[in-house]
Image: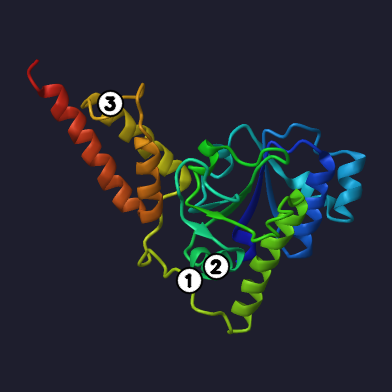
Amino acid sequence: MLERIRIVLIGTSHPGNIGGVARAMHNMGLAELALVAPRCEVITQDSISRASGADHLLHQASVHATLEEAVADCTLAVGASARSRTLPWPMLSPRELAGRLPAECQPEGARVALVFGREDSGLTNAELQRCHAHVHIPTNADFSSLNLAAAVQVLAYECRMAWLNQADGQADAPSVAPVSDGEELATHAELERYFEHLERTLIGIDFHDPDQPRQLMARLRRLYLRARPERMEMNILRGILSATEKATHRKPS
């Protein structure tokens, strides 16, 4: 299970924080680190020192230009955030997230991404809306700011406890039942292609005005990400959009 969990850091500005994250991951048995548009050098004396023996994760880390690229093959992406600032999104506690992991990681090809934002500003609204759900660490309301490595440590610990419970045969029932009956879930990349196709079609039939979006696409994203469509279902939906486009083009002007 742990080998199917990817830690994704977006726009990290200090190499020491990347090293601290590598240490937190290695402590808990996580090994896959992805960096999106880092604002600093990854391999430095500071990052290696902070990694404290986990610097192999720094050397193995993948670097990506965008979040979409970093999570393209993932079937579940969860963004770490205190809240969705423009539109409510499914919110989990770290323990609720951990309760989902055994079922989420079970299908062949499943990949889970835990996404963390910048030290100074976190994740943008656009990035949050590319996640299936958000996870909130219930810190002291009077002092809620967490160091990046500390936030990763909390979630990595919960991941490890879920893995240990599963290995001991003591795992509680997942907080959310598996959404697929053995069929492969659509990946993040497949969902993004669908959203691009959906927006293009809605504009083509004059249902969606990109100059006055009124959060339409954000709300549709929330709907489909919550539904967790399978690959076959996604193919059906894409087929409906293609047929709609063809029918629209055949209409007399």
Q: Is residue 232 above or below residue 125?
A: below
Is disc 2 placed on a helix, strand or loop? Answer: helix
Packing grade of label 3 (10 A; few <14, some 14-19, many >=20) is few
**Residue 203 horizontal side relative to residue 34, left or right:** left
Q: Residue furthest top?
A: 253
Q: Are marks 2 and 1 in contact (CB under 8 Å)?
A: yes
What amino acid is found at the position of numbered circle 1 in the picture?
Ser
Residue 168 in percent (x, y) is at 63, 83
User: Which one is nearer the viewer's eye here, 245 or 85?
Assistant: 85
Is disc 3 placed on a helix, strand or loop? Answer: helix
Q: Residue furthest left?
A: 252
- Checking the image for residue 203, the label placed there is 3
* Nearer-N-terminus badge (2/1): 2
User: Which one is nearer the viewer's eye here, 206 or 82?
Assistant: 82
Residue 27 in percent (x, y) is at 79, 64
In the rendered view of the protein, which quadrant contains the N terminus?
bottom right
Instruction: Mark yes or no: residue 228 visible.
Output: no
What amino acid is found at the position of numbered circle 3 in the picture?
Ile
Q: Is residue 133 above or below residue 218?
A: below
Packing grade of label 2 (10 A; few <14, some 14-19, many >=20) is some
